[in-house]
Amino acid sequence: MRKNIVAGNWKMNKTLQEGVALATDLKNLLADAKPNCEVIIGTPFIHLATVAELVKDSCIKVSAENCADKESGAYTGEVSAAMVASTGAEYCIIGHSERRAYYHEDYDILREKVQLALAHGLKPIFCIGEVKEEREAGKQNEVVKAQLEGSLFNLSAEDFGKIVLAYEPVWAIGTGLTATPEQAQEIHAYIRGLVAEKYGQAVADDCSILYGGSCKGSNAKGLFANPDIDGGLIGGASLKAADFKEIIDAF
Ligand code: 13P
């Protein structure tokens, strides 16, 4: 059966020292707790090796927020999937709407990133979701379908089985506007249906689909109570250990 997951995405926040302090706080808070979900923290590249070492004896797993679309070589400033894997990180967020919007990452680039992440043993947390105008035009289903088809549906069923999906409506990210549990459940069920059509019901049933977008302690329970919402990808509320723990406790 699929896993419930609460994953943090620190985005471009925290110096190395601040990140170590946050990871330490979270590790301490979870030391005696037995979370009913997998707990992942997604950190900037510079934190990965230190944080992975710090949490290695705890229930916390580590994710990168991105990786390069090239294997290696003369790509100044880029960080490859192999480098991410060498830090001890197990996951890699790919296709976040901020990368699509600000760094022009299109379906083809994201398809490359997914393949490289998988080739180096990383589990992609692949983000999809529509912008406000698309939601207002009722096009959200079309948008997520194209995103899945454009970057993931070339994978074998075996490789697709390693993917975690995150539905993040762009209009809900960092805005304080959350999709209602009904809106989120409806599109999560649609997404699972697309996976079932492509890979069969068993693969779809095993696929964790996270919700992201202004998810916090006060709304997590309502969202996670739905049959097709298997956890959250958390931005702002992952930057304080107590806030993040509140979301973990929603399970
Ligand atoms: P917020 O939780 O800050 O809205 O961010 C969500 C997100 O983008 C996680 O990837």
Image (spheres, grey):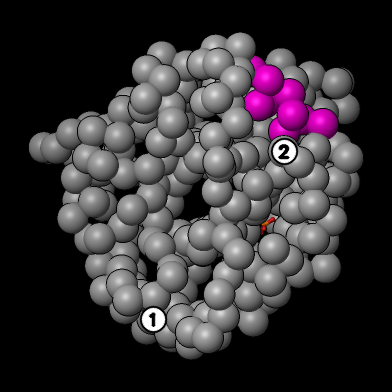
User: Foreground: 239 or 100?
Assistant: 239
Q: From what the image shows, is residue 52 above or below residue 19?
A: above
Indicate which disc residue 20 carries.
Answer: 1
The numbered mark, 1 or 2, whose residue comes first in the sequence reads 1
Q: Can see residue 108?
A: no
- From mark 1 to mark 2, how far is it between C-alphas? 33 Å
User: Foreground: 129 or 164?
Assistant: 164
Indicate the position of residue 15 as horizontal and vertical percent values. Answer: 40, 76
Tag 1: amino acid: Val
Indicate the position of residue 238 as horizontal and vertical percent values. Answer: 59, 68
Q: What residue sits 69% from the left and 63% below the top?
A: 251
Is residue 102 in the magenta section?
no
Q: Quadrant of ligand 1?
A: bottom right
Indicate the position of residue 127 as horizontal and vertical percent values. Answer: 56, 38
Neighbour tally class for label 1: few under 14, some 14-19, many 20 plus, Cα within 10 Å: some
Numbered-mark total: 2
User: Foreground: 32 or 113?
Assistant: 32
Indicate which disc residue 228 carries.
Answer: 2
Q: What residue sits 26% from the left and 42% below the top?
A: 121
The range drawn in magenta is 186-194
* Magenta stretch: dominant secondary structure: helix
Tag 2: amino acid: Asp
Mark 1 CB near ligand 1 (8 Å cut): no
Indicate the position of residue 128 as horizontal and vertical percent values. Answer: 60, 33
Classify residue 180 as left or right of residue 36: right
Is residue 187 in the magenta section?
yes
> Which corner quadrant of the image does residue 34 belong to?
bottom right
Describe the element under mark 1 as helix, strand or loop: helix
Q: What residue sits 76% from the left and 69% below the top?
A: 217
